[in-house]
Image (tube, rainbow, N blue to C red):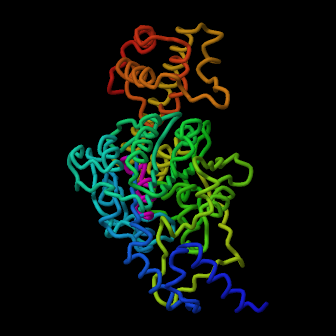
Amino acid sequence: MTPLVASVFLLLFSVTEIVSAGRDAIQGNLRLPSEASRFFQKIEDDGLEGTRWAVLVAGSRGFSNYRHQADVCHAYQLLKNGGLKDENIIVFMYDDIAFHEDNPRPGTIINHPDGTDVYKGVPKDYTGENASVENFIAAILGNKNDITGGSGKVVDSDPNDRIFIFYSGHGGPGVLEMPDHSHLFANQLIEVLNKKRATRTYKSLVFYLEACESGSIFEDLLPQGLNIYATTAANPVEDSWATYCPGHSPNFPPEYHTCLGDLYSVSWMEDTEKNNPVAETLQQQYERVKTRTMNGDYKYGSHVMQYGDTDRLGMGLLSVYLGAHLANDNYTFVDRHDDDSLPPPTGVVGQRDADLVYFWDKYLKAPKGSARKLEAQQQLVEIMSHGMHIDQSVKLIGKLLFGTERGPEILVSIRPAGQPLVDDWECLKEMVGTFETHCGKLNQYGMKYMRSFANMCNAGIRTEQLAEASTLACAGIHANV
């Protein structure tokens, strides 16, 4: 079989996989790449595939977290290039980095050391304090009346529509953070997805999740049969990783002090751009992203996981959710088997250490004796002091509640497979609130202790007991620490 004939067969196979209902439109004639773009456009215009929707969430704020908004802006450009319309793309981000005083290229955001601007044209649907848990939930469910502020845009989907959700930000066991510092707990998200399915307003939904312990959001919680396919940057007990960081990546632009992307996030986007989403399946992308994100032996990488209806939806094509990416009539939509692997990561940093890298690099590059150097030093000390305070407070509380021997063991214990993180999610929320009242905000670093608070609930500890222990452990500490 000649290469040309092989390409023809692959072309026909790709067309059949995407829209089997479109066979009659082909009428038995071979469509060349120049004709194929018009064919796919016709299918989309005729409504036979439904509408593609996307919800993109950057879950953090601050220039040290530059990478999360860069991930989301990059995702927007990818989806826009794939043919999705702005009216069907909903963006949540704090929007405080493009014109931040530390941005060496004002009005520009990049997601790669050699990358171009990904900020231009990004919709500002929910920014600042409007990028909240409540608005995120309302947007997914299509409840315009529950929206507060922002553009008011929601996923107003129909039964034949496809939905893609991408979150990049900070997390902990059973929780994600939103840009306004509110917490989205795993049971809340699963409840939202169940409600969305009950309304029969989508055909299938894909969820890509970048956060530490992100597997805990779905493991033993996301049921089968919702027509949902989810992948996460990490398993339930490990951190995810930032990449393209100062001092860790070759050819890094020296004017930047912050990591530009996240390993899992840039992996799936760079894979989509390198390979052909018309011929690549969700499962194929999962395998490629998993290989790159593991970073050899997982010492400086994480376990990419998949959840939900993986067998049924995993064989679906990326283009169903991300668009066809037929940028022009000469686009050759043939799967690239010659070299379809992703390059190894070029330097990574743990998510919870990325802010330290930012302030340290900022300190090193500031002129000696300058106010900028002093400010960076103070910020670095504050970040480290806060982390030490949270570490010491939680450990002491564990000893006060369970004893000096059993306390440390109970706080870090992991439940057997098949059991959720916590039996009573309301208890977990109350425990977190109680701790923060007496010991200060957990912030992005302290979210790693969500498992400890969950274990307190599972052990039958009451909020009154935690309040008493927290008062003793954090005497003199105010809630704004």
Q: Quadrant of residue 340?
A: bottom right
Looking at this view, is 424 or 242 the one in front? 424
Tell me if I can see residue 346 in this picture: no
Q: Quadrant of residue 406?
A: top right
Looking at this view, is 103 or 155 the one in front? 155
Q: Is residue 213 above or below residue 461?
A: below
Dominant SS in magenta:
helix
Q: Which image quarter holds the C terminus? A: top left
Q: Quadrant of residue 9?
A: bottom right
Image coordinates for residue 366, horizontal then vertical, percent: 42, 53
Residue 74 magenta-highlighted: yes
Looking at this view, is 95 or 421 the one in front? 421
Image coordinates for residue 345, horizontal then vertical, percent: 63, 60
Q: Is residue 388 above or below residue 126?
A: above
Q: Which image quarter holds the N terminus? A: bottom right
Q: Is residue 156 above or below residue 478?
A: below
Tell me if I can see residue 202 in this picture: yes
Q: Residue at x 40, y 60 (%)?
A: 54
Looking at this view, is 318 or 409 the one in front? 318
Span highlighted in magenta in the image: 61-75
Q: Residue at x 52, y 17 (%)?
A: 456
Q: Residue at x 32, y 27 (%)?
A: 480
Residue 102 magenta-highlighted: no
Image coordinates for residue 208, horizontal then vertical, percent: 51, 53
